[in-house]
Amino acid sequence: MRVLFINPPECAASGLMDLAAFEPLGLELLAASLAPRHETRLLDLVFEKKDVESAIADFKPGMVCMGCFTSQVYAVRELLRRAKRCDPGLVTVVGGYHPTFMPGDFDEPFVDAVGIGPGVPALAELADTLEAGGDLRLVPGFYIRRGGKMVRTPARALPESLDGEPFPDRKISAAYRMRYHVFGVGPIAVLRTSEGCPFRCTFCCIWDFTGGRYRMRSPELVAEELERIEERYVYIFDDNFFVSRPRVQAIADAVAKRGIRKNYWCFGRADFICANPDLVERWAGLGLTNVYIGVESCTDEGLESFNKRSSVATNNEAVRILRRSGITPDLGFIMRPQATKKDFRTLLAYVRSLGIHKEGYAEYMSLTPLPGTQLWSGMQDQLVTRDFRFFDLIFPVLKTALPTRTYFRELTRLYVRTYLNLGLLRRRWRGNPLGLNPLGTLKSVAASFKFLWRLGKACLLGARGYVPRSFARRESDAG
């Protein structure tokens, strides 16, 4: 059977996604699980101009599969509707974070199956059952449409580790690989060595998505996959790479033994970095250049409200350790709806005190109760919109202490005042020396300024057209 995977376009209205474009690793893993029994193809609509109708006419698939984040809900539903209209006999499948927690959003006649939770083994069984003419309702891990209704199949038990899963099928993304980047640095590949996170931050849905499981791939298999990756830049896209010292040490041993030389980016927690400075330094020697830390707040009170289980002192020390090891710290912050103008100024001063505006990256997000998080059930009455297009972690979808437009302008100023300086050019030049990537510097700067321009329009134009009308109507109620 032929299976068409579609990577939907980025739907973040803010333009945040202009800063990075990653290969669709989840779809590549699914494609690998179907080989060699099924023929697969990828349509990446982040870059591709080809419409879904033409792709279906050319490939003639029996199944169309898509993943979906919350901000992509409407775009994904429209794509599935169009696919079904092209060929009513097509089996349409959607999975990912949002469908797992909000399957009712896909209870439509043009959706045949909704995947629940991690889907690599599930989709392979679904495709095999479909081709054999079996009953899809017996395949665990789905909602299946039968008789005009969505029927829940049995829950799927996940394997203890990821070792049984194949390596991603990166051949299906061959046409797009030169365009995958982060902050203009690329081409960059994505590597997954584990799935899940043992922590339970209130704004994160990973714990529930993975059923509270932390599943790993053995260090030798990680190193073997790394050897197969052609790109020089690799983003270790684990939910949390720095969790277990013995495991991170073992992966370092396996990488060193094979003599693999790459430039790595990864996610990590500040407390792990502080407890293991020697291991951080070793990874720096293996090529680790950037670590993204979810700092979230510049106050201990803010960290406690997120159940972050960290402190400002720990975050500060982690930044110092990374810098001492020659690693660039990339920090993520979350603005709470109660933020005042003073809070925005305080955060900017904190970022500048860490020198992030000179060496590093800062990402400022609005607290967003996404489906599957602890915040989702507790903050429903505070939502000012349920239009998922604006659940992109930038727009304030909760009632804010400041008028919505004022809040948005303050968030914009954080980005502008952080990045509009000579340090921006210096960072990009170091990350993309002309001898390695002739266009890297220009691409990186262009991506950054494109994002700032789109976001900055909110300031220049009084946020008209960038803040939903429903927000503006409620401004008088804010605060």
Image (cartoon, rainbow, N blue to C red):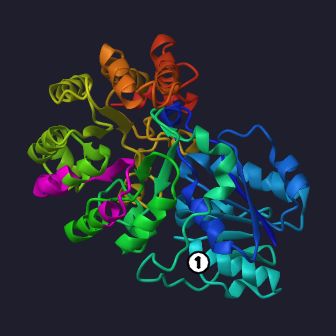
Crowd class of label 1 (few under 14; some 14 to 19; many from 20; radius 10 Å) = some
Q: Which secondary structure lies at badge 1?
A: helix
Quadrant containing the N terminus is bottom right
**Percent position (x, y) of residue 425?**
37, 18
Write down the residue under mark 1.
Answer: 121
Task: Name which quarter of the figure residue 209 lies in.
Answer: bottom left
Magenta span includes 366: no
Residue beneath the point at 40% across and 65% down: 223
**Percent position (x, y) of residue 129?**
75, 84
Nearer the observer, 72 or 196 = 196
User: Which region of the structure is painted magenta?
Assistant: 254-281
Q: Is residue 342 left or right of residue 93?
A: left
**Percent position (x, y) of residue 23?**
56, 49
**Percent position (x, y) of residue 458?**
48, 19
Q: Is residue 216 visible?
A: no
Residue beneath the point at 41% across and 60% down: 205
